[in-house]
Image (cartoon, rainbow, N blue to C red):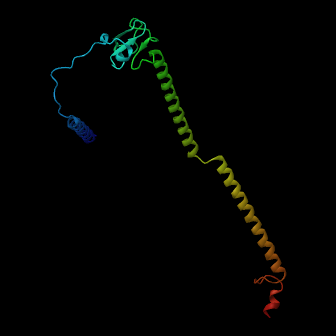
Amino acid sequence: MSSFTTKSQKVTASAFLAAAVLCVSMVSPGECQTTPSPVTPCSAYKNCDTCVPHAKCLWCFTTNNCTEYPVSWLLPPNSVCMLSQARWGVCWLNFEALIIALAVLGGIILISITVCCCCCCCCKKRRSGPDRDEERFSRRREEIKQRAEDRKVERKARHDEIRRKYGLMGDSDHPYSKFENE
């Protein structure tokens, strides 16, 4: 048990070491930028078209001003701007419609994933066992084969009886066989 634990610890340590080496090798040395570029405040933008291309800014049609988007809140509070009057990203789509559209899209995606998973599970379950139709057809084939075999045996028995009657059988148990051999 202790040798297994030691081996698993060695494998885990090797995996972490490989991951660290991989991460370090992907990081490329870059140039440090000592002077940050000047950041324009959102209040400097005077119309919606210049305000909304910046991800940190939010345009409010109620007050006709560009304010900083409160990142700590997913939705801007009513003190900043009402959702129906707020624009972020594009001027033609208000925040309320954006939220509704994303919620509907997310719902459709979740429902389609659920339906796909259920269909896959049902199809897999159906394929795993033989179909009722296949069982019925195979049973019917067996019955037909058995009836054909019975008819064949019956036909052979009739033919043998006719051969015995007319002395065409090669065996010695029919009454006319002794006359043929003399």
Give above or below for 45 relative to 34.
Answer: above
Give above or below for 33 relative to 129.
Answer: above
Give above or below for 95 relative to 182.
Answer: above
Quadrant of the rendering where the N terminus is positioned: top left
**What residue is shown at x 32% (from left), y 17% (from top)?**
56
**What residue is shown at x 77% (from left), y 72% (from top)?**
156
Quarter of the rendering containing residue 45: top left
In the image, is 43 to the left or to the right of 118?
left
Q: Viewer-proximal residue, 172 or 27?
A: 27
**What residue is shown at x 42% (from left), y 12% (from top)?**
86
Q: Pinpoint residue 119: horizontal percent, then vertical percent.
A: 55, 37
Q: Viewer-proximal residue, 111 or 125?
A: 111
Q: Viewer-proximal residue, 34 or 49?
A: 49
Q: Pinpoint residue 102: horizontal percent, then vertical percent.
A: 46, 22
Quarter of the rendering containing residue 172: bottom right
Q: Viewer-proximal residue, 127 or 72?
A: 72
